[in-house]
Image (cartoon, rainbow, N blue to C red):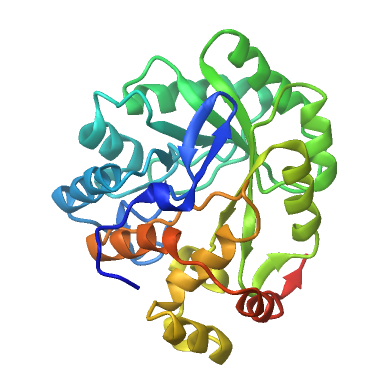
């Protein structure tokens, strides 16, 4: 790929409700620590470096940041880093947060939030980010059970103005329909990437496109590495061949394939490394051929 300064606008834009975002965004999960996210052996990232990465992301045109109050490590909180780095916030910056999981100060995971506890989680995100409302709140779902009561609770908070839009994370097809019967849904975040996606992923991807809902994959680069990040020693030869053909990294090819799955697909790669940030944003300008796309799609491993 070229050495020109990357621009997140190169991948195009999408609407999250009435909010326009560039399709290359930034995920804050890995911003707070070295090592696996949420791992017991994690150590905090350098604070100044993390703040510099966030500011550089915005300089490169990133205007969609994904975060959550439960993204923290010893001494570091993703929300508070975002607040420190970017407040007062630009008018076009969209911050998406997640609620549902609850995490204790020591990193433990108590029971999933009940509907009546979601208000507290939303208010905590607002406090940490230093805002008076949230742009988008995603309900992170814990299994295929009904979610109507939780969506209903968030819909009430939307009516109160505490959040502008609602989304879903880690959901099943029936849950999307259930949620949409209660309130408008602007995005769905599910695990999806080359060689790492659920058996129903293509159906959900297609449904979101038909409904005008953004599909926002997580682990698009990390794939099977998930919270630990990508295993660069285990890349498939086909992916490596395509990367060499474009003078790109395997991570950039993964992002380009992801964005190529539809104009409604957004990418939220995360990193605490400035060089990785620029490479991720540059991937928005990478265009794969139809044959390359077919080869990568064939690597898909669908599971439950």
For the residue pair 56 and 147, the one nearer the viewer reads as 56
**Picture quarter containing residue 95?**
top left
Residue 13 image point, x, y percent: 50, 42
On screen, residue 177 versus residue 220, left or right, reads right
Residue 123 image point, x, y percent: 46, 20
- The reply to whether residue 106 is visible in this rendering is yes
Q: Which image quadrant: the N terminus?
A: bottom left
Give the vertical position of 242 relative to 167 (above or below). below
Outermost left residue: 48
Give the vertical position of 102 relative to 25 (above or below). above
The residue at 57%/32% (across/down) is: 16
Q: Which image quadrant: the C terminus?
A: bottom right
Residue 97 image point, x, y percent: 49, 35
The residue at 60%/15% (across/down) is: 158
The residue at 61%/79% (across/down) is: 292
For the residue pair 274 and 37, the one nearer the viewer reads as 274
Residue 128 image point, x, y percent: 34, 28
The residue at 38%/49% (across/down) is: 8
On screen, residue 88 versus residue 149, left or right, reads left
Q: How many marks?
A: 0
- The reply to whether residue 28 is visible in this rendering is no
């Amino acid at each position: 790929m070229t050495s020109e300064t990357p621009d997140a606008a190169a991948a195009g834009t999408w609407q999250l409700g009435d909010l326009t975002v560039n399709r290359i965004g930034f995920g804050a999960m890995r911003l707070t620590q070295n090592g696996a996210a949420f791992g017991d052996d994690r150590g905090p990232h350098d604070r100044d470096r993390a703040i510099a990465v966030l500011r550089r992301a915005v300089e490169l045109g990133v205007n969609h940041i994904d975060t959550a109050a439960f993204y923290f490590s010893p001494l570091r909180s993703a929300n508070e880093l975002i607040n420190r780095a970017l407040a007062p916030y630009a008018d076009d910056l969209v911050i998406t947060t997640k609620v549902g999981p609850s995490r204790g100060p020591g990193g433990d995971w108590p029971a999933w939030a009940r509907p009546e506890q979601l208000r507290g989680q939303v208010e905590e995100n607002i406090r940490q980010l230093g805002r008076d409302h949230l742009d988008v709140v995603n309900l992170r779902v814990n299994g295929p059970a009904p979610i109507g009561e939780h969506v209903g609770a968030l819909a009430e908070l939307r009516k109160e103005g505490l959040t502008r839009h609602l989304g879903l994370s880690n959901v099943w097809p029936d849950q999307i329909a259930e949620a949409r019967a209660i309130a408008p849904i602007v995005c769905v975040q599910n695990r999806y990437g080359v060689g790492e996606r659920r058996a129903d992923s293509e159906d959900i991807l297609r449904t979101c496109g038909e409904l005008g809902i953004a599909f926002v994959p997580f682990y698009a680069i990390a794939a099977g590495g998930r919270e630990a990040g990508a295993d660069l020693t285990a890349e498939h030869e086909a992916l490596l061949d395509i990367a060499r053909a474009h003078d790109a990294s395997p991570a950039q090819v993964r992002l380009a394939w992801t964005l190529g799955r539809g104009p409604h697909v957004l990418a939220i790669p995360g990193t605490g490394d400035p060089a990785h940030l620029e490479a991720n944003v540059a991937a928005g300008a990478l265009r794969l051929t139809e044959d390359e796309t077919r080869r990568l799609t064939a690597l898909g491993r669908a599971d439950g």
